[in-house]
Image (tube, helix red, strand yellow):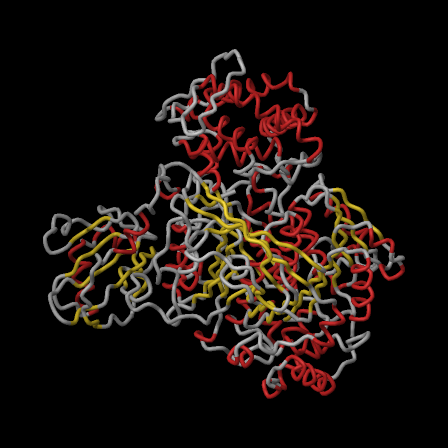
Amino acid sequence: MRSAKVLVINLGALGTEITKNLVLSGVGSLSLIDSHIVGTQDLESQFFVSKDEVGTKRLDAAASRIQDMNPRVELNFDKDDFRTKPSSYFQQYNLIVATDLHSADIVKLNAISRRFSVPLFVAGLNGLSGYIFVDLIQFDATDEKLKSSMATPLKRLSQNREVIEVIEHFNEEQSKTFERIVTRNIYSPFEKMLKEGSLKGKLTRRQLKRLTNAVPLTLALFDYDDETSSLNAQDLREKATEKCVQLGLPVENLQQKYIEQFAEQAGLEFAPVAAVIGGAVAQDVINILGKKQSPLNNFIVLDAITLDMHIFEL
Amino acid sequence: MSDTSSVNQRLLGSENYQKLRNSGVLLVGAGGIGCELLKNLVLMGFGSIDIVDLDTIDLSNLNRQFLFRHRDIKQPKSTTAIKAIQHVSNSKLTAHTANIMDVETFPLSWFDQFAIIFNALDNLEARRYVNQMAQFLHKPLLESGTAGFDGYIQPIIPGSTECFDCTTKETPKTFPVCTIRSTPSQPIHCIVWAKNFLFAQLFASSGSTIGDGDLGTDNPEEIKRIQQETNELLELQEYVRAGDESKIPEIIKKIFVQDIQKLLAIEELWKTREKPVPLPDIEVDGIVNTDLSSVWTIQEQVNAFVLSTQRLMKRLPEEGQIEFDKDDQDTLEFVTTAANIRAHIFKLPLKSLFDIKQIAGNIIPAIATTNAIISGLSALASLRVLNLIKNQPEAKAQELNMAFTSKASNISSNRYISNPQLAHPNPKCPVCSIARGVLHVSQEALKTTTLSELIQKIQEKYRFEGEVSILDKSTQRLLADYDFEDLLDKTLAELNLKHGIILSISDESVADEVRCTTEFYLDEVKDAQLRLPNIEVPLVKVIPSTEETDDAVGAIESTASGEIILDALEDKNEKKRPLEDEESSSSLPPSKKSATTHDEGVVILD
């Protein structure tokens, strides 16, 4: 943990939350790359910048407040656009957290992270919704639990998760037998998830029916290459319908009002949504660096109205 | 996209946003959840936010209560939190450094000004109290709590949904900071000190170091004391980090002799307690006891303390920091011996290494990210409760969702959060199934009205047919019932019934149907003589119960299983400063209970 080098891309509402959590946790070295300028909208979702810093670089405004939280964390600030960096730049990190990216940039970054075997978290906000995508490529997680009457078998748990090793050990103090279970997680690249990800056979019919519209809509937004500010509800509906078919969700679940709202709110940052998504990302990053607990695998969507937050293997 | 338009306004819609800007909210607690929640509520743009916290900032808060810095130690949490978030605030922020249960500062009517109340509390007693105030006022309450990776939020809509007391809660096991740092009275206090204070400060990431700026106080003595404490700690850290083993005797002298002498100098502390005895000079002879399940002599403790400190110092340069792990022999031995030497000093029983391994392993740390997630969910849930979400029809109370951590709590592998809809109130709930009202009374009336006159008025107005019993809930004092009539002729003033007291009236008649139990909040006013509220007290069927009717009351006092003395039970006169944390509630929601089984003796703190 203390020796880990983590890169956070973009210091928006999410980047701010994630940075706060990682700095508090005492991560060894944290690098921030962000080329944006403080706008008035930042003041509604961020706490490392202030009113009188509108118009200055976000990193210039935030740097001293971040360092002040924990002087022991080594911080690096880079005001370039991360897209201008050569791919070798990303190789130096043990883990990358990218926020507020368009899908084309996620695909490019994911190709680099895979080439250098760097774990990647991608997260974004869409108004009253937010998502997390995780690509650890391959990750063996070790969990310890009390052995039940039946030993844990070596078996595939799901499409991407498999128990590959179970070691029993007897705890003399408690005179109980524990199992150390190693679960291998395989991850899909972002592009593959977009093109092929499906929920068929993974959720019950009832779960499929009750699933929030935010899931197909979030994935539909990734079909827009660039600016989402001009998107219209009709077009989004068509893309979301395609996503429902691909995922195996009932198309009739799509609600017009929800789609309209989603279209209006794409890319907007809302502080409490950032708190939940940023908290979840940071918790998983800390767990992975500390090799504790099974990591997220691999796509999470929050519906901030119903507080529904499922984990999907896509 | 216009740069001047507010994002929050676009998200919620103009009308709702205006409502939000005109709403005042109350946030109770400025600790782990409170800091995060304050930040969320400020950024959302609530019109005004009042934040209440009695506590001052402790060193151990800094690794997750992100609004606080080292220079803020010993400052009040509420005012410091507000100062730290001011730079992004468009809300009117008001800090109250006081106990939320103080009826003089916060009478019932004070709570009425808020649109919603957020609980970000650490203890059951205050949670119960605020829940009760919300029930009196029919005010929506957002309850929340965390313990380690577990956390929950629960909106409470009085009259429509389950209240905080509809399910029985475990009593949280937290300790006041002062008990840990100054006046341990049980071995567990010494273990918490050794693990969460001493070890954490010397070897682990403490999350912060000294700030060189404003200490936030003008009192020169206070400044001197803070600086001294900080400098001494830094000095010990430096010895440890420098790897200079020759300094170990100095470390022992500082923490087991000089610090104890300083405590002894505060005479107040020892009026009712046995004085500690500083560790006498002990020649370290290097002989260690290898029997891990026996209690070592003090000589063996000191020997092992020196050796484990040496080993940890050797490891430090390479590892940078060392976290306590009960399976890491060096860290366990350090904590065991430090705890036992301290226990010896305070004349408390010593424990074996195996025992301490068990206890120290059960101390659940507060986790910053859990607080962040839970506070985000709490803020989001409030929008739906207040009906501020654009294009959403007003939700019926039972359509609202509560939420609790699911993946992190090992309840589900495919849900990060579980979000069941709110349940109906429990018809047997001792708090929300009863009738409530405010009894307005003047000073004059308190002096002239006798208890029997009050009882008679109540019986007449609410048509209690037979005998009633009357209880002062604030002190758990029975005032009168069918075989206790000694106080009937006393005046209310003589009985010390005053503003803020809650009276509970129960129908004691033997019948199939009796009047529902009724509680009155005594509100002292100037003009009214004695005015009973215009409320309905319905007849209810008598339900044969297996438990005593004052079940809820008993639950506050009864200890949970396990040998650990609880915060709520400690010296009532002592100022309470929960060690860790606002979020350390074990009061998990009902749906979660079945899935979470904590071992007996689990201690939730940092």
The residue nearer to you, when weighing B13 against B325, is B325
Residue B392, image x and y in percent? Answer: 56, 79
On the question of residue B179 being in view, the answer is no
Residue B25, image x and y in percent? Answer: 53, 61
Residue B519, image x and y in percent? Answer: 28, 61
Check the picture and name the quadrant holding the N terminus of chain B.
bottom right
Which of the 4 image quarters holds residue B254?
top right
Measured along the vertical axis of the image, is residue B215 above or below residue B396? above
Q: Residue at x 89, y 57 (%)?
A: A86
Measured along the vertical axis of the image, is residue B485 above or below residue B319? below
Which of the 4 image quarters holds residue B540?
bottom left
The residue nearer to you, when weighing B456 against B172, is B172
Q: Is residue B84 left or right of residue B146?
A: right
The residue nearer to you, when weighing B519 against B563, is B563
- All told, the count of numbered labels is 0
Q: Is residue B297 left or right of residue A68?
A: left
On the question of residue B391 being in view, the answer is yes
Residue B593, image x and y in percent? Answer: 41, 59
Q: Residue at x 64, y 38 (%)?
A: B205
Measured along the vertical axis of the image, is residue B583 above or below residue B315? below
Measured along the vertical axis of the image, is residue A162 above or below residue B248? below
Q: Residue at x 70, y 41 (%)?
A: A2
Which of the 4 image quarters holds residue B371?
bottom right
